[in-house]
Image (cartoon, rainbow, N blue to C red):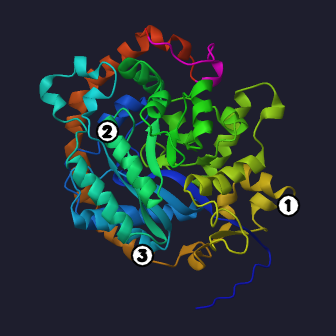
């Protein structure tokens, strides 16, 4: 089918590639503020709480989140989905089916951890009562079964919607399993998604458990590879960054959630100066609480002006655009066919109204796109040459019908969220105690600031 659409008065750009997103907590949006990652993660975003989502509810949250992604400039997304106890075929398929129906390009990673949560955060094992330890993020299916599931999904989903490998974090999985997961991903030519050094407590996690940083640990066990997508990297030391660059790995930077959760400001300047591809992401629905790539690109660039007085090192608007497009494609392992408007590349693109406030008057296009409110000028979105958004309206699915069904089911879905809340509240005081103990640890003194740039050391931790 051929469609001709006039671009008169419109600006056409490559679609934005969202390199980190969680669709699973769409019904948890707006539940908290002013909490750090380690407490929020178990109290307000507990993926293993058995809420009993139906496949239809999983489908709806993925579609409605996907529609918001499109309006936020995303044409390709890396969705790191925690399905917790629900790894049955219907629940898993609902995620992939949603992206197929919506027309969005998606790399979907079904996340997995094979270590219980209380063993992955410093001091939690010491302070958590025994009866609560059984609620940790232990694996629901065996390692062998998970590897088989990833393998089967990768064969089934290998087009516009692909299946990728998701190892929740190096401290959350056993060494042998990580090695098998990375080997599998290499054989499948797929990336591996993994959370690394997101918070200051995670900066302590490596020395506390392994006597070295988490990045050094990954290198030593052989999983710091070219197909590694290192999510966050806020507290990477200069030595960590050197290791990442040497491995050819990539980073997904999520500035909005890092700020909301008090995790800090990632060393984006140092990453880019080492030639590390850095894409941008939007992270969780209730750890952001939006999913706008316009917002992520703007903050990613602007925050770096606080990191050094040498303005010559500051990323500029074009750096922001590269992060949202070309670098995002490299993070996906798709540098050869995504992220640019050129012959041979996929037809994933955005079209903006040049008469909208963000572009009136028109000066430097890159500056308008990154710093002005370009989202309000977005008119059309195409993925793989097919329209997904036309004149601001979703055209690939019946949006009104989707929203009507969500509203019809909302009371039931909200009750499932509310009913799970007491589990988190019971754990909260113990998590706070472990958090406070972590901050007292002398190993965290070099990381006493709220951002990586202020650290007095240059080599990272020395285990004691």
Q: Residues within 10 Å of mark 1 (few under 14, many from 20)?
A: few
- Residue at disc 2, secondary structure: helix
Instruction: Let me know if residue 462 is in the magenta part.
Output: yes
Q: Determine which quarter of the picture holds residue 38.
A: top left
Q: Which mark's residue is nearer the viewer, 1 or 3?
A: 3
Q: Residues within 10 Å of mark 2 (few under 14, many from 20)?
A: few
Q: Residue furthest bottom?
A: 1
Closer to the camera in the image, 109 or 248:
248
For the record, the magenta segment spans: 451-463
Give the labeled residue for mark 1: 362
Residue 407 seen in the current view: no
Q: Is residue 92 left or right of residue 275?
A: left
Image point (50%, 35%), residue name: 260
Quarter of the N terminus within the rendering: bottom right
Task: Work out which quarter of the rendered image holds the C terminus and state it.
Answer: top left
Q: Is residue 440 above or below residue 26?
A: above
Q: Position of residue 110 (x, y in %)?
A: 34, 54
User: The residue tagged with tag 1: helix, strand or loop?
Assistant: loop
Mark 1 or mark 2: whose residue is earlier in sequence:
2
Q: Are marks 1 and 2 in contact (CB under 8 Å)?
A: no
Going 62% across and 31% down the picture, which residue do you hit? 242
Residue 101's disc is 3
Instruction: Report the residue marked by disc 2.
Output: 176
Q: Is residue 352 left or right of residue 45?
A: right
Name the side, left or right, on which 60 lies relative to 337: left
The span from disc 3 to disc 2 (Cα, nearest Å) is: 37 Å
x, y percentage for residue 172?
Answer: 33, 35
């Amino acid at each position: 089918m051929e469609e001709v659409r006039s671009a008169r008065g419109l600006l056409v750009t490559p679609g934005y590639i969202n390199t980190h997103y969680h669709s699973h907590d769409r019904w948890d949006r707006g539940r908290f503020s002013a909490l750090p990652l380690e407490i929020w993660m178990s109290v307000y975003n507990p993926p293993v709480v058995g809420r009993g989502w139906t496949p239809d509810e999983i489908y709806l949250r993925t579609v409605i989140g996907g529609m918001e992604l499109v309006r936020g400039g995303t044409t390709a997304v890396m969705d790191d989905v925690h399905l917790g106890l629900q790894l049955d075929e219907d629940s898993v398929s609902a995620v992939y089916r949603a992206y197929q129906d919506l027309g969005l390009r998606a790399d979907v990673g079904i996340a997995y951890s094979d270590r219980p949560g209380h063993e992955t955060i410093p001091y939690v094992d010491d302070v958590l009562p025994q009866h609560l330890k059984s609620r940790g993020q232990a694996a629901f299916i065996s390692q062998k079964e998970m590897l088989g599931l990833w393998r089967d999904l990768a064969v089934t989903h290998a087009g516009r919607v692909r299946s990728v490998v998701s190892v929740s974090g190096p401290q959350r999985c056993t060494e042998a399993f990580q090695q098998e997961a990375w080997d599998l991903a290499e054989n499948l030519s797929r990336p591996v998604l993994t959370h690394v050094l997101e918070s200051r407590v995670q900066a302590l996690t490596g020395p506390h458990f392994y006597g070295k940083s988490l990045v050094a640990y990954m290198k030593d066990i052989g999983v710091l590879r070219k197909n590694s997508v290192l999510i966050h990297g806020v507290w990477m030391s200069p030595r960590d960054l050197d290791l990442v660059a040497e491995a050819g790995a990539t980073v997904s930077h999520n500035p909005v959630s890092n700020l909301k959760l008090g995790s800090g400001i990632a060393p984006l300047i140092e990453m880019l100066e080492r030639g590390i591809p850095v894409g941008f992401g939007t992270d969780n629905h209730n750890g952001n609480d939006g999913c706008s790539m316009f917002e992520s690109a703007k903050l990613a660039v602007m925050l770096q002006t606080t990191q050094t007085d040498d303005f010559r090192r500051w990323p500029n608007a074009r750096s922001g655009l590269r992060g949202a497009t070309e670098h995002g494609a490299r993070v996906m392992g798709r540098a050869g066919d995504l992220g640019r408007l050129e012959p041979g590349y996929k037809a994933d693109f955005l079209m903006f109204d040049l008469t909208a406030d963000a572009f009136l008057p028109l000066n430097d296009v890159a500056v308008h796109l990154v710093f002005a409110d370009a989202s309000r000028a977005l008119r059309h979105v195409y993925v793989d040459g097919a329209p997904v958004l036309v004149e601001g309206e979703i055209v690939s699915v019946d949006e009104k019908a989707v929203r009507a069904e969500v509203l019809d089911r909302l009371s039931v879905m909200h009750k499932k969220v509310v009913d799970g809340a007491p589990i988190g509240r019971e754990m909260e005081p113990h998590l706070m105690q472990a958090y406070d103990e972590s901050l007292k640890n002398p190993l965290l003194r070099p990381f006493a600031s709220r951002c990586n740039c202020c650290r007095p050391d240059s080599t990272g931790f020395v285990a004691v």
